[in-house]
Image (cartoon, rainbow, N blue to C red):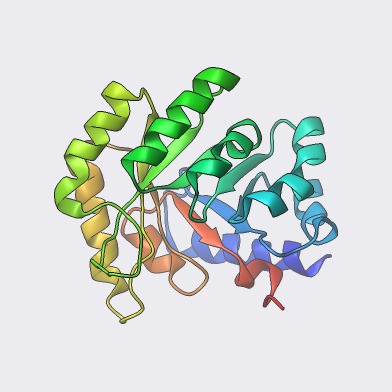
Amino acid sequence: MHKSINNLVLINEEIKSKFDDIENINIVAVSKTFPINEIKPLIDNGHIHFGENKVQEAVEKWAAIKNSLKHVKLHMIGKLQTNKVKYVVPLFDYIHSLDNIKLAEKISTEQKKQKRNLKIFIQINIGDEMQKSGIDKEKLRDFYEKCVNEYKLNIVGLMCIPPQDGMHKSYFNEMLKLNKLIGLKDLSMGMSSDYLDAINCGATFIRIGSKIFGNRN
């Protein structure tokens, strides 16, 4: 068995052993920087959710596969520049990193043009970090309502990358409260080091890279 399949099986078994209700938990295999021959075994084994963070790399790697395998879902998990949106909308199924109104407007325009309707997460700057993008918690409701009412975006949930200060559980709990406040179903949070805590706090999409594919070069 290919090592990435083996790793994914172990992760799934671990989740099953710790949680009763796992129907809504989706593992996004973060395949950025890994070549398609490393990813293909997972696709052949039935895994459908994959995450990329660089648009050009994703287009080169995924265009042919997405064309022939419509069931495979591609997630844009990195910072998205407005000038790249026209490449993202036809290829990706999810955007996890909507973090400003200009981007919301651009996505809306492109989706109309290309007759696509992606599932979108609003990225929250949950730790109020200067260097990180994301919407301020206090401005979330206004931002959400504008995205839905004015730009007609399909907002499915919130996303965060918490600070590395050992307090991730409290940030995850805060995210769950914010999600409930807006009445959204999905939560994108948790990575290779903290996904069990994230699931415990209501995550429905966990983004796992190194624990599936191994360390990046």
For the point 60% across and 39% down, which residue is it? 88
In this picture, residue 20 sits left or right of residue 55 = left
For the point 78% across and 31% down, which residue is it? 67
Query: Along the line of sight, which residue is nearer the eye, 64 or 198?
Result: 64
Q: In the picture, residue 126 is in which quadrant?
A: bottom left
Query: Along the line of sight, which residue is nearer the eye, 11 or 164?
Result: 164
Q: In the picture, residue 173 is in which quadrant?
A: bottom left
Query: Along the line of sight, which residue is nearer the eye, 20 or 189?
Result: 189
Residue 45, percent across and down?
A: 78, 50
**Which image quarter is the N terminus in?**
bottom right
In this picture, residue 80 sits left or right of residue 71 = left
For the point 32% across and 55% down, which residue is it? 134
In this picture, residue 132 sits left or right of residue 82 = left
Q: Is residue 186 visible?
A: no
Depicted 4 relative to depicted 177: above or below: below
Q: In the displayed image of the protein, which residue is found farthest to the left?
A: 138
Q: Is residue 151 visible?
A: yes
Q: In the displayed image of the protein, which residue is found farthest to the front?
A: 83
Residue 101, percent across and down?
A: 32, 39
Numbered marks: total: 0
In this picture, residue 206 sits left or right of residue 131 = right
Depicted 97 relative to depicted 210: above or below: above
Q: In the displayed image of the protein, which residue is found farthest to the bottom?
A: 165
Residue 171, percent across and down?
A: 26, 66
Depicted 26 relative to depicted 70: above or below: below
For the point 35% across and 65% down, which residue is it? 132
**Which image quarter is the C terminus in?**
bottom right
Residue 193, percent across and down?
A: 48, 75
